[in-house]
Amino acid sequence: MSLQPPVTLVSPPQDIDACFSDIHPPLTARQAHLESARCLYCYDAPCIKACPSDINIPSFIQQIHSDNLQGAAQTIYSSNILGGSCARVCPTEILCEQACVRNKEAECAPVLIGLLQRYATDHAEFTGHPFDREPESGKRVAVVGAGPAGLSCAHRLAMKGHQVEIFEASEKAGGLNEYGIARYKMTDDFAACEVEFVMGIGGITLHTGQALGRDLSLAELQSKFDAVFLAIGLQRTRQLGLENELATGVQNAVDYIRVLRQAADLNGLNIPQRAVVIGAGNTAVDIACQLRRLGCEEVTLAYRRGTESMSATDHEQQIARDHQVRIKTWCRPEVITLDDHGSVAAIHLRRTEMQGDALVDLPHCDILPCDAIFKAVGQTLDMPDDEQLELLRLDAGKLAVDTKFHTGLDRVFAGGDCTAVGEDLTVEAVQQGKLAAESIHQLLTTQA
Amino acid sequence: MANLFTRFAGIESPNPFWLASAPPTDKAYNVERAFEAGWGGVVWKTLGEDPAAVNVSSRYSAIYDATGQVTGFNNIELITDRSLEINLREIEAVKKNWPDRALVVSLMVPCEEESWKTIVKLVEQTGADGLELNFGCPHGMPERGMGAAVGQVPEFVEMVTRWCKTYSRLPVIVKLTPNITDIRFSARAAHAGGADAVSLINTINSITGIDLDQMVARPIVDGKSTHGGYCGPAVKPIALNMVSEIARDPQTQGLPISGIGGISTWRDVAEFIALGAGSVQVCTAAMVHGFRIVTEMQDGLSRWMDSKGYQTLEDFRGLAVPNTTDWKYLNMNYKIVASIDQESCIGCGRCYISCEDTSHQAISLTSKADGTNQFDIIEAECVGCNLCQITCPVNDCITMVRRDTEKPYMNWLNDPRNPHGEAR
Ligand SMILES: Cc1cc2nc3c(=O)[nH]c(=O)nc-3n(C[C@H](O)[C@H](O)[C@H](O)COP(=O)(O)OP(=O)(O)OC[C@H]3O[C@@H](n4cnc5c(N)ncnc54)[C@H](O)[C@@H]3O)c2cc1C
Ligand SMILES: Cc1cc2nc3c(=O)[nH]c(=O)nc-3n(C[C@H](O)[C@H](O)[C@H](O)COP(=O)(O)O)c2cc1C
Ligand code: SF4
Ligand code: SF4
Ligand code: SF4
């Protein structure tokens, strides 16, 4: 079954909000029944191995098929408490669905695991929270950052009977689920509802507007708590290193998305007419597509290598093309020119090519007039200003942790995007938070 | 194109596809539509004595496969709920309009000679081609001493059949109930009573499921239910077996059989005929898909016959009967083993876990470097049971291949391992 809906782009005076409905609409009951029938209930299933959070996929799909939605959701949540958001944001085409054995048969189409996961988590009804807490352990853990990694860790620790306090720098919890994921993937107030659901287990206290390095220090947390979990994500956007990079009209993609995600009224947004996005990852695709949905007439995505090297998956690239985003490869930003008011007027893109192993400039340069440039060339760790943190070991610019997510500092663990482990994906962050919680629990219960 | 002309118990029809006595043949309106669609014959919905039966509301329930298709169908309807007079007038008119089609009339009256004598005479006057005696209805009618209540007692079957043969010159088909332990006894009784043919199977006593909220079986009639009669694809294996038992029985050798039960495609039709059926009857498939389904059945059967070089139904009728035998005659020295085509294997592991958990531990699992698994047959352990082949989702991925034991045919009777065998 093909479930790819046509992309709706705004054409004034149409309501912009209508253009931000689900990119993959949820399955109907009938579709879910038929789709779940396609699962072969594999033994030692490849899809489970390909799910970073180890969800027992054949089991929950079987439960959907036998009308046991509550059981299905519980199966999902027991491995991944943010199963609802992962169902919406996971790049399934490179994870579970890529491994599905149904790809290999003549039909060449995987079971739509992500949409089935969404069906179960959307429709399961629980009275109260699906998990009970173990008896109070008397231990207290501080979690820094309320993104997927922090929430997942907090939930698992609370389940194990520990008291958890989360310190979050922003006004709202959720991390990039709340502020970063494309609006057409995470519609309505799903991120906030999910935070509420996670907190529903009890034993978790959330402090928002509390930043490590600004309002609290790690030493303080170490002294007040039995363990600390750092899940502060990647807060700094990599820069292009060009002159005029700070001019009006040149901005970080994630900052614009943050505003877009929080906007109550999209019509109030500052929407460029001609935009150039620099980057090749999912953030680049996300900003490009969202700009098109907002009504930006011309969006060009510029990347210095070929499409095959782009970190955005083929599926994401196709989504960009469906949004009529122009993907311009083999060119690198060289000069940003400004108009008389000091606002961006054009970008010069230098053509490139591979010569042997080296990426080299070619003589030709394209000049693209534009009124906005979005930087989406990657996020890096923004180390909070804190004496203790300076002691942390780094690995490729991110926090180094061992297999138990221990940082090396006394009772300090870390997980999610801020660590050097795994890919920067929501589901990875959830898994790392969960595994770190298990390690912390082990530490707390083996301690005298 | 193959010739599908059928002559069954002296009744002729342009093809072997008949509609079984049931709602599709309830009245002139339906039967006319069926003939227009191409059905070769019908067995009119069972007639009874007046006053006509009365039905309840909520009458059917079903079993579905994983994709939502009906695999089993259950009903609690009775025989015709219209008066005898109206039915007889309609039968007469329809037969006049469609002289080339088979029109058989199904009957069920109390087990009294007078009743049967009267009704067969009335039917004969309509110009109908034959009679079918409904000794099969499993619900509602047995309570009144009819249907399965007669069909389950061979003596009654023989007696009523004889009455009908005595009072009517029309061919008599006896419709058998499967709700017995050995179908051959009923068939022999019908044969002894002079039946021109038997038809089978009627529906099987069934409860399709329970509504777990209301705690009542389906279909629900004001909070209560009752067992019904089961039919549809799910009953085909039972019907095929019963047909084969009669076809193989020396005592009923040559008795024409009209095959009924779960027929939905041309392949089902071919299977019944291969086991000796001379015509087939369909109910559920028509009820679920409408009369047009006969088009695909007819086309499929003709093409298959062409591909095999069969010009008439007689060319392949009964060919599978001699190959259907008793277990004791099977060759104990025949050996097959499973073989996996690694090229088409998708690595689902179903074969492995089914053999490992429930069969003979004859499949090995090897984890490969890329994280996927390879599955291989351990021939020495494989007993050739077919389980892995059955559970494998890929067509022709697992095949059962013959291994030469270099031993001649030897059945159980001659097997030295048989404590009661002739070899002892
Ligand atoms: C634009 C964009 C789109 C994306 N789209 C997808 C997608 O479609 N699918 C997918 O799987 N992944 C996607 N990702 C990646 C995904 O969002 C991240 O991998 C995931 O959110 C990481 O979770 P985290 O908890 O480690 O970090 P975050 O979600 O970044 O959460 C970190 C939290 O820590 C807080 N924090 C930071 N510093 C401090 C401090 N000093 N003190 C207290 N709190 C602090 C932050 O405010 C934030 O709430 C996307 C990322 C971006 C940027
Ligand atoms: C709703 C319904 C009513 C039936 N009524 C009769 C009947 O009146 N007389 C009869 O001989 N068989 C009756 N049958 C049985 C069918 O004729 C037939 O034997 C049975 O359904 C098996 O065929 P199938 O699997 O193609 O449906 C009825 C079946 C159904 C589903
Ligand atoms: S690999 Fe595909 S078919 Fe097999 S269990 Fe997973 S989802 Fe089901
Ligand atoms: S098929 Fe449906 S509409 Fe028709 S009589 Fe039956 S219940 Fe009524
Ligand atoms: S059941 Fe078939 S496809 Fe699946 S692992 Fe076994 S041989 Fe391969």
Image (spheres, helix red, strand yellow):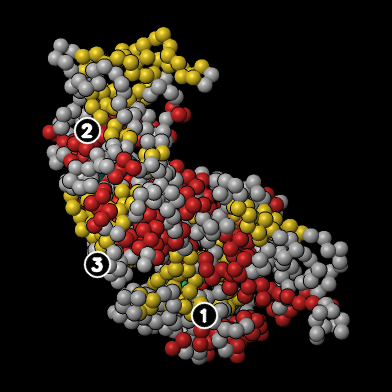
Left-right relation of B379 to B114: right
Q: Callout 1 environment at 10 Å: few (<14), some (14 to 19), or many (20+)?
A: many
Instruction: Give the labeled residue for mark 2.
Output: A256
Q: Callout 3 environment at 10 Å: few (<14), some (14 to 19), or many (20+)?
A: few
**Residue sitting at 51 percent across and 77 percent down?**
B204
Left-right relation of A439 to B379: left
The answer to whether any part of residue B260 appears in the image is: yes
Left-right relation of B18 to A374: right
**Residue sitting at 31 percent across and 56 percent down?**
A227
Q: Nearer the viewer, mark 1 or mark 2?
A: 2
- Between residues A108 and B353, which one lies in front from this camera angle? B353
In the displayed structure, B180 sits above or below A247; it is: below
User: Ligand 2 closer than 8 Å to the CB at disc 1?
Assistant: yes
Question: Label 1 near label 3: C-beta < 8 Å?
Answer: no
**Residue sitting at 22 percent across and 37 percent down?**
A258
Instruction: Give the labeled residue for mark 3.
Output: A128
User: Ligand 1 closer than 8 Å to the CB at disc 3?
Assistant: no
Question: Marks 3/1: CA distance?
Answer: 54 Å
Q: Which of marks 3 and 1 is in front?
A: 3
Q: Mark 1 lies on which chain?
A: B
Q: What residue type is labelled 2?
A: Tyr
Question: Marks 1/2: CA distance?
Answer: 76 Å
User: Ligand 1 closer than 8 Å to the CB at disc 2?
Assistant: no
Q: Which amino acid does label 1 sit on?
A: Gly
Percent position of residue A282, x then y: 35, 35
Q: Which amino acid does label 3 sit on?
A: Gly
Percent position of residue B274, x then y: 67, 64
Instruction: Give the labeled residue for mark 1.
Output: B136
- Give the number of callouts: 3
In the displayed structure, A364 sits above or below A18; it is: above
Q: Which chain carries label 2?
A: A
